[in-house]
Image (tube, rainbow, N blue to C red):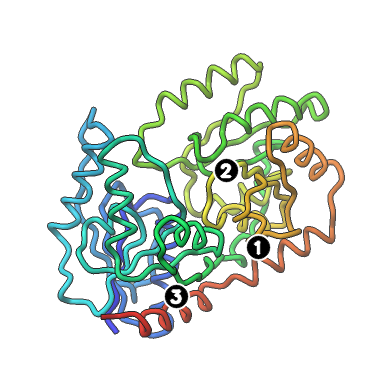
Amino acid sequence: MRIALLTYSTRPRGGVVHTFALAEALAELGADVTVWTLGRGELFRPIDPRVRLKIIEFPEIPGEAMGARIVRSIAVLRAAFTPGEYDVVHAQDCISANAVDHCVRTIHHLDQFTTPELAACHERAIVRPYAHVCVSAAVAAEVTAGWGLRPAVIPNGVDAARFAAAVPARKHGQYLLSVGGIEPRKGSLDLLTAYARMRSSLSGLRLVVAGGETLFDYRDYRAAWEARAAELGVVPEVLGPVPHDELPGLVAGAAAFAFPSTKEGFGLAAMEALAAGVPVVVRDLPVLREVFGPAVGYGHDPSSLADALLDAIKEPDPARRERGRQLAFAHTWPAAARRHLEFYERVRR
């Protein structure tokens, strides 16, 4: 079976990380796999040579509007892709699903866009593929309720051993970590308020924010976030994208991991923190209840997030920590790859 996996970037973001990890696991099982992606800078990590790479040049255009960038991304990927070479074409995001005419699609989570180009892109990427995968039952239920589709549910894999073996970074002192950048979906403003509440009990605790590669323009939100930080009198450390080899140590060194996202499909970054033995607190969403169960703490607003994070730091729970590690190690990429191969055999046309 010749398989093409399509994604939109060479930089680390949840769906991109998922695509390359799945490709490697499929190749390990003997599948003929090619990843097609737009070349947005250097590839974030080395990839198993058994995976063929088709990286399409995609130069940045200074000042390009977000809608125009999305439309150009679709056009460039569509012009380069050669669908006739593959038995299965698997799009991993809205851009790649719009760039091909006949594909299966993984819907990691559902977005709500007000920009007409983005809203249309999002809709087409759901209704045009002939078969669908979701990484959690909660997102699959949303797709069924909204569009009457019946996605297969195949949870993410986790490279748990990589995070479990990490040597904790110490250069940041005692810190609360968030991975995913500063954007509305990541609940960044709520995190700021929660952190400010925590400092009255843990004055030496720092807030470190990593990640943040995105196609979208969140400059206004980032400005509001910075203004709110100044208002609260807090000075977070914003690292931006962290090199692949440094991320496990950064995660392992955290006093706690905050995951206050307002929308998620699975929560891969939080699962990696569990593998590293770090206490995790997430927003109380149905999808995160499904994925994490009792292995994490929950909060629904800044106050309850702060309380749960303080409990996690000041009163560590060894039983919860062990449940978290076991949960992370239960999600393997080989298992996810086998289920994908079964799915491809069942649905391919």
Identity, as a three-letter code, of the amino acid under mark 2:
Ser
* Marks 2 and 3, the one that precedes in the sequence: 3
- Quarter of the rendering occupied by the N terminus: bottom left
Q: Secondary structure at mark 2?
A: loop
Q: Is residue 57 above or below residue 84?
A: above
Determine the CA span between mark 2 and mark 3. 28 Å
Identity, as a three-letter code, of the amino acid under mark 3:
Ala
Pointers 3 and 1 in contact (C-beta within 8 Å): no
- Quarter of the rendering occupied by the C terminus: bottom left
Q: Which residue is mark 3?
A: 25
Please name the residue shown 25% across and 31% down the image: 65
Q: Secondary structure at mark 1?
A: loop
Q: Which residue is mark 2?
A: 261
Please name the residue shown 28% across and 57% down the image: 96
Q: Which residue is mark 1?
A: 165
Determine the CA span between mark 2 and mark 1. 26 Å
Please name the residue shown 57% across and 43% down the image: 261
